[in-house]
Image (cartoon, rainbow, N blue to C red):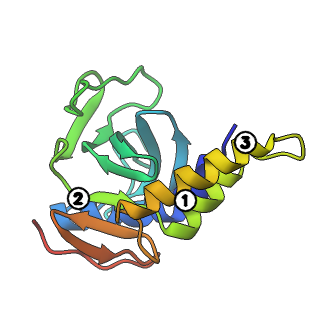
Amino acid sequence: MRDDSLLLPDDILVAFGNNLLEQAGSKLRITGVRSQGHDYVQFDAENPAGRSEQGRSPRLVAPICRLRNGVIGFRSILLVKDPAKRTTWLTNGQSSRNTREIMFMGEAGPKLAASRDAFEAWVRSSRTAATPRDAIDWQEGFIADELASGLYGDGFDILVGDERLPLARDEAVVPAP
């Protein structure tokens, strides 16, 4: 099984999320990744204005859409009202039970693309000493085909339409599309 943290590390997800929150005009700041699923990322956050009404730090969830391996977008960023209760959202990323929408982009918003090095490390992470030669050859062909797509750059990038903007771990705001 592959380690997805090789593809999009937590600090990159935090930088991307904070970038989007700042773009939306939110005062919330993401402090770390709490958990990840196939279709969401859950974050711990802080509110510079103070704690929530329940006395807890805010928790956010970002339903994601996957375009390719290592290229994702947040459909929305949702505030979890009460972390002790069940939380749900609609398949398109809109808020539902126990969530409040901070921003909604659907599948048209900016995308986060992994770097070439991270993509290669992620694909090769499933190899063992017992991996057959034909499987290794297939992986190398897969890497070459994916890198030829032009989606993966030298570093982690934000894709806005046809524009590629580098994402640093201490990211500033990108212009709105």
Q: Return the disc, 1 or 3, that comes first in the chain's sequence.
A: 1
Q: Which label sits in the foreground, 2 or 1?
A: 1
Q: Is residue 91 left or right of residue 128?
A: left
Residue at which label 1 appears: 119
Q: CA distance from mark 2 to mark 1?
A: 19 Å
Q: Is residue 59 above or below residue 160?
A: above
Q: Quadrant of residue 82?
A: top left
Residue 33, horizontal then vertical, whole percent: 52, 51
Observer-nearest residue: 140 or 38?
Answer: 140
Q: Which mark is residue 134?
A: 3
Task: Give how far across and how far down residue 48 sits, in percent.
Answer: 35, 66
Q: Quadrant of the N terminus?
A: top right
Label 2: element kind:
loop
Residue underneath mark 2: 110
Locate residue 117: give its quadrant. Answer: bottom right
Q: Residue at x 22, y 74 (%)?
A: 174
Q: From the viewer's perspective, is the residue at label 1 or at label 3 nearer?
A: 3
Q: Is residue 47 visible?
A: no
At label 2, which amino acid type do we have? Pro
Between 90 and 163, the one lying in front of the other is 163
